């Protein structure tokens, strides 16, 4: 459920930031380097390639080693937001690269999935469209557990999928803190996590799969709320997510950013492939 959308927020490019979206140095003979989310000086995640015809991707790399919680915000976030909070936005914006961000306050129900396991997008929906890797003969591998939440049709030729990707795996979380949030979520769905988000739209140039369509991937990289998110998944209860959707960091263009906000207000619906 989309609870609220805020005005587009501009983050000053002259400020130093913990995170940045960018391109790795181009390998010799290649037209582009890998598209990355950097945490400090280190690559934290490899993202969908620039071309838009390669498969959707978020692959955890060695630079993703810590969460980005802000101690001064914990009481506010643990109590939960009634609406988009300017103080919380200001605090987390200081971590982000310069650019434009659309704030969204969401209520969602996360489901933890593991690569290759039941419900894994990369070995199910993605394989149906792209097939397996021509080199490895395997599905794409994100190198991290992640959470699946909402999905819905864009139109007859496209479907949107939402993911919440932790900066560190749930196995790194403290079990006692997870249990504390399980108890808290049993009484309220307002405890709030925070993420920086991107929208990537990917569709293969050629139809080699069994279900050909465009995949819209709304991916939230979790900054704060790792224990909350795990607790919500384990207890099968909803929580809130404050998303800062990066316009410049996304492969999608402006009109598609506006469209995903409209779509995110709609109920969840699974894809029903057209009969061959």
Image (tube, rainbow, N blue to C red):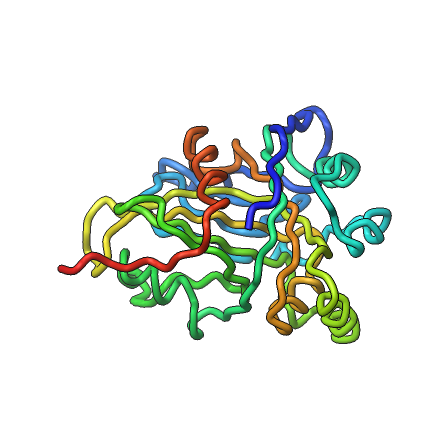
Asked where in the image residue 136 lies, by quadrant, the reply is: bottom left
Q: x, y (%) of residue 72?
A: 86, 47
129 up-or-down from 99: above or below: below
Asked where in the image residue 119 lies, by quadrant, the reply is: bottom left
Q: How many marks?
A: 0
> Considering depth in this image, is 60 or 231 the residue closer to the camera?
231
201 up-or-down from 16: above or below: below
Asked where in the image residue 168 lies, by quadrant, the reply is: bottom right
> Considering depth in this image, is 236 or 136 the residue closer to the camera?
236
- Indicate left or right for 166 with 46 as reference: right
Residue at screen point 55% across, 58% down: 60
Residue at screen point 68% across, 49% down: 194
Q: x, y (%) of residue 149?
A: 51, 59
237 up-or-down from 51: above or below: below
Q: x, y (%) of residue 232?
A: 64, 66
In which quadrant will I find the C terminus? bottom left
> Considering depth in this image, is 139 or 215 the residue closer to the camera?
215
Q: x, y (%) of residue 105?
A: 63, 44
Residue at screen point 74% across, 66% down: 187
Residue at screen point 43% across, 53% down: 161
């Amino acid at each position: 459920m989309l609870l609220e959308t805020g005005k587009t927020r501009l983050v000053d490019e002259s400020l130093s930031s913990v995170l940045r979206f960018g391109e790795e140095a181009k390998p010799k003979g290649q037209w582009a380097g890998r598209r990355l989310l950097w945490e400090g000086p280190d690559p934290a995640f490899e993202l969908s390639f620039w071309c838009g015809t390669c498969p959707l991707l978020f692959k955890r790399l060695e630079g993703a080693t810590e969460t980005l919680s802000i101690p001064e915000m914990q009481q506010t976030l643990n109590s939960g937001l009634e609406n988009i909070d300017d103080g919380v936005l200001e605090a987390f914006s200081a971590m982000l690269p310069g650019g434009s961000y659309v704030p969204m306050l969401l209520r969602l129900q996360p489901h933890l999935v593991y690569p290759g396991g039941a419900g894994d997008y990369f070995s199910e929906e993605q394989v149906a469209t792209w097939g397996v890797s021509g080199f490895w003969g395997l599905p794409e591998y994100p190198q991290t557990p992640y959470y699946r939440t909402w999905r819905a049709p864009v139109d007859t030729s496209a479907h949107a999928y939402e993911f919440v990707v932790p900066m560190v795996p749930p196995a790194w979380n403290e079990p006692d803190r997870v249990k504390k949030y399980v108890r808290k979520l049993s009484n309220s769905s307002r405890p709030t996590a925070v993420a920086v988000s991107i929208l990537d739209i990917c569709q293969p140039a050629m139809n080699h799969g069994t279900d050909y369509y465009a995949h819209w991937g709304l991916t939230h990289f979790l900054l704060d709320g790792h224990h909350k998110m795990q607790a919500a998944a384990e207890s099968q209860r909803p929580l809130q997510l404050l998303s800062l959707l990066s316009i410049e960091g996304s492969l999608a263009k402006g009109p598609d950013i506006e469209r995903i906000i409209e779509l995110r207000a709609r109920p969840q619906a699974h894809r029903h492939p057209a009969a061959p």
